[in-house]
Amino acid sequence: MHPCLILCLLGSLPALSGASPFPRRRPSNPGKTVDVKSLMLLMMNDEEDGSGFDFDLPAYPNCPFGCQCNMKVVQCSDLGLHYVPNDIPADTRLLDLQANHITEIREHDFKNLHSLYALVLVNNLISKVHPRAFLPMGRMEKLYLSHNRLTTVPRNLPPLLEELRIHDNNIKKIESRTFAGLHKMNCIELGRNPIKNSGLEPGAFDGLHLNFLRISEAKLTSIPKDLPDSLRELHLDNNQIQSIGPEDLRHYGELYRLGLGYNKIRHIEFGGLYYVQNLRELHLNHNLLSSVPSGLPEMKYLQVVYLHSNNISQVAVDAFCPASFSVKKTFYNSISLYDNPVHYWEVQPATFRCVSDRRAVQLGNYKK
Ligand SMILES: *[C@@H]1O[C@H](CO)[C@@H](O)[C@H](O)[C@H]1NC(C)=O
């Protein structure tokens, strides 16, 4: 896995242990919180000169009431706040405002915060962000807006932003050029928003370089065609995608992980996977496929294929492996086919001749 991509998974990281001067707050709403301690450790790792923190500094004399301030980290979670406090120290690097009752981000809420590295606003009631609110944040790399009530991605995102998490809002539309000018972007989490294909306006992702994108649990009926062509991971699970046409993946030749589980895919047209020759991992479990998609044997690097819980009734001897061994650069280390109406005893063992270990194939039993 690309090391940067790990950062995208921060929300699900277990709390890092170890000595820390920061008292742990009990999350008021487990599963909906950002672990600020992990975030701080990340920030410390990211500090290029290593001098981002002054460990001798005493607690801020002017910490907003009720918050905890220490080493340029200001924690104001679970305080019932309706607005961003107006007296946040100007040199703050990490601002944690999660689990409050903030409904709106106003134009000057972050006026003086030119040094901010990460802003945590998850689990509030935010439905409005002033289009100029993020302008002062020339150094911000991480913005967490999940579990709010936004209907659109805020405009004028900070230019050095690397990670945007805006999961579980009410976003129906991504406007044209929403991400224009963001050249350092690594990861965008847009899952659990009611986005339809028609809600992605033409050029929505224009000018964006991005490694990782998740639009899971949305209302997509096909693979969007205008996503950034730099993508290395694309997660579209839990949508209503019905098929993959020959051109659908045309721009995504850099992909090495593709998640399409829990959709309604009945068929993948011949050549549908032609453009994604670099894939390492393909998840097609929990769909309606009646056969193993064509094109798998030509993928030199494919190692993981999930096809369990489909409607596959036959598996041909050349469904996965090329005729000549030399074609495949890496053998499979996981193929799942269980929960399909195939007679497993009819699948020839040679079908899995390019699998690293026999235990890497999960056939299982079909009971109905
Ligand atoms: C599964 O495939 C069979 C044909 O092999 C078809 O008759 C049936 O309708 C399919 N089931 C679903 C749920 O699509």
Image (cartoon, rainbow, N blue to C red):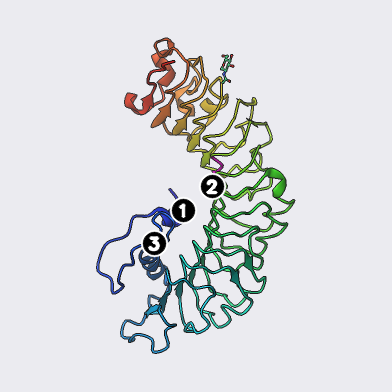
- Please state which amino acid type lies under the numbered disc 2: Arg
Query: Which residue does the image show at 38% across and 68% down from the upper left?
Result: 40
User: What segment carries the magenta color?
Assistant: 232-237
State the residue position of label 1.
5
Density class for disc 1 (Cα within 10 Å; few <14, some 14-19, many ≥20) is some
Q: Is residue 362 magenta?
A: no
The quarter of the displayed image where residue 183 is located: bottom right
**CB at disc 3 and ligand 1 closer than 8 Å:** no
The quarter of the displayed image where residue 263 is located: top right
State how far apart marks 3 and 1 are (Cα): 28 Å
The residue nearer to you, when weighing 287 against 270, is 287
The quarter of the displayed image where residue 34 is located: bottom left
Residue occupying the far left of the picture: 19
State the residue position of label 3.
28
Single out the mark in the foreground, 3 or 1: 3
Query: Which residue does the image show at 31% across and 73% down from the upper left?
Result: 22
State the residue position of label 2.
232
- Please state which amino acid type lies under the numbered disc 3: Ser
Q: Are marks 2 and 1 in contact (CB under 8 Å)?
A: yes
